[in-house]
Amino acid sequence: MSYTDKLKNVSVLGAAGKMGSGILLLTALEMVNQSLKPENKGKTFVLNAIDISNEALNGLIQYVRAQAKKTAEKQIVMLRKAYADRADLVENADIITQYENDVVAVIKPTTRIEAAYDSTLICEVVSENPDLKVKLFNQIEANNKLSPWYFTNTSSIPIKELDEKANLDGRVMGVHFYNPPAIQKLVELIKAEKTLPELESFSHEYVKNLRKIIVPSADVAGFIGNGHYMRDTRFGIEMVDRLSKEMPLHEAILAVDTITREYLVRPMGIFQLDDYVGIDVVQYIMKVMKDRNIDNKLQSDLLDKMVDAGVKGGQNSDGSQKDGFFQYEKGKPAAVLNPDNMEYVDVATIKDKVKAYLDAKTDTMPRWKDLLRDKKKADKLKVWFADLKADQSTGAQLAIEYMQKSKEIGLGLVNDGVAATNEDVNTVLETGFFHVCGPINDFV
Amino acid sequence: MLRKKIYMTAGYNTISLGTGRKEFHPKKPRPDIEHYIKEAGEGTMKKLKNSESIDESVIGNFMAARYNKQAHLGAFAPMISPVLEYKPSLSVEAACASGGMALMTGMKSVLADTADSVLAIGVEVQNSVKAVYGADILAGAGYFKDRKTGHAHFFPGQFSDRAGAYFEKFGREKTRKAYARWYKQAIENARLCDTAQEFHNTHPDPEALHFKSEPNPKVFTDHLNVFDCSKVSDGASAIAILSEEGLKKHGVDKSQAVEIVGYGHSVEDITQKPKDPTVLHTMADAIAKAMKMAGITKDEIGTVEIHDCFTAAAVLGVEAIGFAEHGKGTDFILDGHTDRNGMVPFNTTGGLIGWGHPTGATGVHMAVTIWEQLTGNAGKAQIEMKPDRPYGMSVNMGGDDKTLMAIIYKRA
């Protein structure tokens, strides 16, 4: 079966979720792009958007339409050529509207999983729960006579486990998008032990056509991205424990978050990132990794306590940030959690104290936002990290320690065979986490 | 020779608003077309004594009917001032030469003895739609039946084709170098004029920026990059067109006025493709007529406002005037002759690429710039007019060399 034939009937499970909607959009765009090629004229493409919520499915179509319009506006030069044979489409506006309509037309929203019984490709984007995933696979397997291929968007569960539990005989591949999929460039591709070679090459072609950066990861729980991130978070919590001997817990949290954001020149501090991902998600992925003996240190009483108290981070349906380590105002941390009494303390009231404690000279400190597109990025980082190393302040010492640990985690992933190369680890952190430099660098 | 003396005075420009101006933010509300008409109209009227003596108004505009869903602009004149109520006013359109047509209309009223004082305004507000849709609107300056086969960015596509033909005939590298030099001059001149769209431009090396940016056919045109193109602009300009009697009525000292000594207005069949893509025939025709009427040669022209909607048009414009023979317009620019310190300073406040190109306003803006230069009102952008080159010329083009309006000015 050719690439386009395999794409002719696809189902996305969990299509209206945060990740699912992005994967659905990208797949719909890819289907329409394929259908516009001369050799595919007349072929019908079907994309079943399957989700449990009708409400969310309604919003999904609006989202896809708006995104398809933006895509068409950007690709108008190419699209005019693709629609050249349509005499009725004259102005750019005509072509953009047609493209929007074409994208929406391939999507069939439904709450019925039965739609997946006719699909040759199933993209699974449901919550990170192996039992649920396997249950859905089993149900489709029992009814779909086409021996479909499966993509799973799991960020932590070994693909081999899913393959075996659902008796898929290698018809499954890990295709791990980053959040939000429409924007993030990175996709980790995970081939399980028995994954069919033709499925593997199909997934490469598909992801490449979505214009994503592919990093292959070994089929080890957590893969590269979470393999680094979970340990990085775990180290942050250890550092908080240590600092809390000298200061209240909430000040220690703010101190470590500040170090990881400002001194390490990352887009978010480590605890802000945990809030973004969801405290319960972090807790769960750590457990997935720990249960599989990937790293028995991957557990945190602090995270358990927070989740037990209902402090879980994550986003509201309007995209705003829920309370976690921090409370947010206009997307910025405004108050920090004191886990001792589960109350929030205004950041403004302790900011200066924490700053004075860290006390690093920040004259050459670059800002993350400025560096992303700066051609002299490497030079500026070199100067800054050299200054940090020479600085005897507590903050500078902690930052260097953190960088060393982050590098050690990265090297460990290569050493354990999770990542093939140092470069792969760095690519994941740079493109999936937007770090200005990968952890395996010569700065430390 | 003109059968009667015509003067212009009291020029006024709003800012040219769009990307590049610090005030501009694509998602924030912006002034509407009423604002621009009123600001420019009032600007000119305030410079005139007895503004109630204005006999009529004319508004040049290209596509407010699509950009702003507003036609019938002539009837906006009384909104500027009640003294214009119940007086004649109309809007005129010839694509990007609409401003030039507003001047032409005013001049003809004076020549016909039906008015001594005409308020001429040009206006366009284009940021109301994204550029990708603006391209559809601007394509109306071409033949609509060619739209389907044209480029997504229709006019950049037309001039890219001209640039490609020129590259082939006369060499790509040198031509692109001339384009880059033109861009640099446009930006540097715009930095001297606080109403210019590129007034806030601080790039350390615009010439290198342009030259290093290779055209990318996947997202734009085959032969032009974005720096080869004028931007999307909101703006208006106004100027008063007066007879000798009009000067007296408004108490205008001649030192503050320019005299129109010749004009050329030519059109070519819009349904036809260019006869030779490396030549602007209609532009050459209009310029030749204007110079003939003025009784002057190109060697007496001291400054030019040329319609550089694209750098490619500027090179062809230099040749259309006759400053360089066919294929040598690039050398004329690279030798520095169009520089503000050169033989004939061109586009001294940045032209369409540097000052901005609110399409329907551009013809009037050109007249305002020449008026400023000849009367010492150009501020930091002021050039010195050489005694043996006392004339200024504006060359306003509509569409792809389809409607042309050339005007020659001298100190009154």
Image (cartoon, coloured by chain):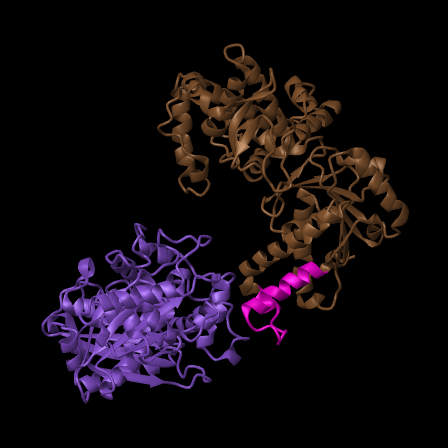
Chain colours: A brown, B purple
Of B121 and A184, nearer the camera is B121
Report if residue A87 lies within the magenta region. yes
Q: Nearer the viewer, residue B61 or B262?
A: B61
Q: Is residue A305 above or below residue A55?
A: above
Q: Say whether residue A243 is magenta.
A: no
Quarter of image, res B268:
bottom left
Q: Is residue A371 above or below residue A249?
A: below
Image quadrant in which the C terminus of chain B is located: bottom left
Tell me which secondary structure the magenta stretch mostly adopts: helix
Where's residue A111, x and y in %?
79, 49
- Position in image of residue B399 (x %, y %): 40, 76
**Above or below: residue B412 compared with residue A48:** below
Which percent across, then down, holds residue A333? 52, 30
Residue B130 in the figure: left or right of residue A47: left
On the rendered structure, is B271 left or right of A291? left
Does residue A72 appear in the picture of this structure?
Answer: yes
What's drawn in magenta, residue-wise?
A79-105
Q: Nearer the viewer, residue B115 or A99?
A: B115
**Relative vertical location of residue A43 with respect to residue A329 in this rendering, above or below:** below
Q: Is residue B141 left or right of residue A172?
A: left
